[in-house]
């Protein structure tokens, strides 16, 4: 296991000029499906779909218009675009999010209309701050800081969760480029829509390279290690995530060409 000191200082390192680190010269792709399962083995990648799968659909402008999650009810969202506003509607017909986009098509704030309490429904607004590369650096909700994100060499070094007493998640990286912008920043400020907002580009760009390890600071028992299989175009198509206690998760990703 990598020492805590090493984890804290390692950021996104560019490797040798090999096939994995070159920008793709051929067609570009976007995420089409992401399947997940857990266990000790993934005998066939296609078997991952039995547990949980996300399906993504886009319009002719490349904007996501439909996200369908296999696991459970009311996990199908549709997207209606009007100027810089995007209304997200659940399969029940309820409008659950209203996103505000900047001129790059990245969400700068969203209104969450799905909250319920003993006094009835209420709304919450989250706002997002980005750097010049369109990577998140800060998340606020109702004017209060929820997450601070530290980047180095266009990779996520750490992010904090104020809800958990500023617990800090720290990361190291492989030398494999993160084509397709995988891997969300999980924060209570963007739960539950973080997955589809991030992977479809609505929350900006992912880390420049694929993560190798992550853990909560000073808690090595929480470390997870990731290995990824890439296709001939350099996109991750199968990812294995192993936790310190041996628990394993598998992600299988399919991509569609951007015409």
Image (cartoon, rainbow, N blue to C red):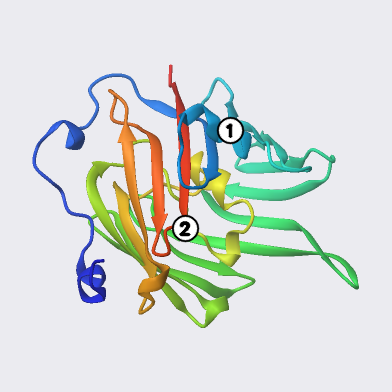
Mark 2 residue element: loop
Q: For the point 33% across and 19% down, which residue is it? A: 27
Work out how far the residue at label 1 is from the one at label 2, CA to CA, in angstroms: 23 Å
Closer to the camera in the image, 3 or 20: 3
Residue with the mark numbered 1: 49
Bin the neighbour count of mark 1 within 10 Å (Cα to Cα): few under 14, some 14-19, many 20 and up: some
Position of residue 192 measured from the top left corner of the image (x, y, whole percent): 64, 55
Q: Give the label on residue 144, or none.
A: none
Q: Quadrant of the C terminus?
A: top left
Please tell me whether residue 195 is drawn above or below residue 111 in the rendered image.
above
The reply to whether residue 105 is visible in this rendering is no
Give coordinates of residue 60: x percent, y percent: 55, 20
Residue 110 located left or right of residue 120: left
Tell me what residue is drawn at x 46 percent, y 37 percent. 42
Q: Is residue 225 left or right of residue 22?
A: right
Residue at the (60%, 36%) spot, across then down? 53
Q: Helix, strand or loop at disc 1? A: helix
* 59, 33: nearer the viewer: 33
Of residue 241 and residue 143, the one placed in the foreground of this image is 241
Question: Are there few (<14), some (14-19), or many (20+) residues within 10 Å of tag 2?
Answer: some
């Amino acid at each position: 296991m990598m020492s805590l000191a090493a984890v804290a200082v390692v950021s996104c390192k560019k490797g040798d000029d090999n096939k994995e680190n070159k920008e793709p010269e051929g067609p570009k792709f976007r995420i089409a499906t992401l399947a997940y399962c857990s266990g000790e083995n993934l005998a066939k990648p296609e078997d991952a779909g039995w547990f949980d799968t996300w399906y993504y659909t886009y319009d002719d402008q490349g904007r996501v218009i439909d996200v369908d999650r296999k696991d459970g009810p009311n996990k199908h969202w549709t997207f209606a675009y009007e100027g810089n506003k995007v209304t997200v509607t659940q399969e029940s017909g309820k409008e659950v999010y209203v996103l505000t986009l900047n001129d790059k098509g990245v969400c700068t704030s969203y209104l969450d209309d799905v909250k319920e309490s003993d006094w009835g429904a209420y709304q919450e607004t989250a706002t997002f701050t980005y750097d010049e590369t369109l990577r998140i650096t800060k998340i606020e909700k109702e004017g209060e800081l929820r997450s601070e994100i530290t980047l180095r060499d266009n990779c996520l070094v750490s992010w904090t969760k104020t809800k958990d007493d500023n617990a800090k998640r720290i990361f190291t990286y492989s030398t494999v480029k993160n084509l397709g912008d995988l891997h969300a920043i999980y924060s209570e400020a963007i739960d539950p829509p973080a997955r589809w907002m991030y992977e479809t580009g609505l929350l900006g760009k992912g880390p420049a390279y694929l993560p190798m390890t992550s853990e909560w600071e000073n808690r090595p028992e929480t470390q997870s290690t990731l290995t990824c299989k890439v296709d001939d175009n350099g996109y991750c198509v199968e990812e294995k995530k192993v936790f310190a206690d041996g628990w394993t998760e598998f992600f299988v990703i399919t991509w569609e060409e951007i015409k």
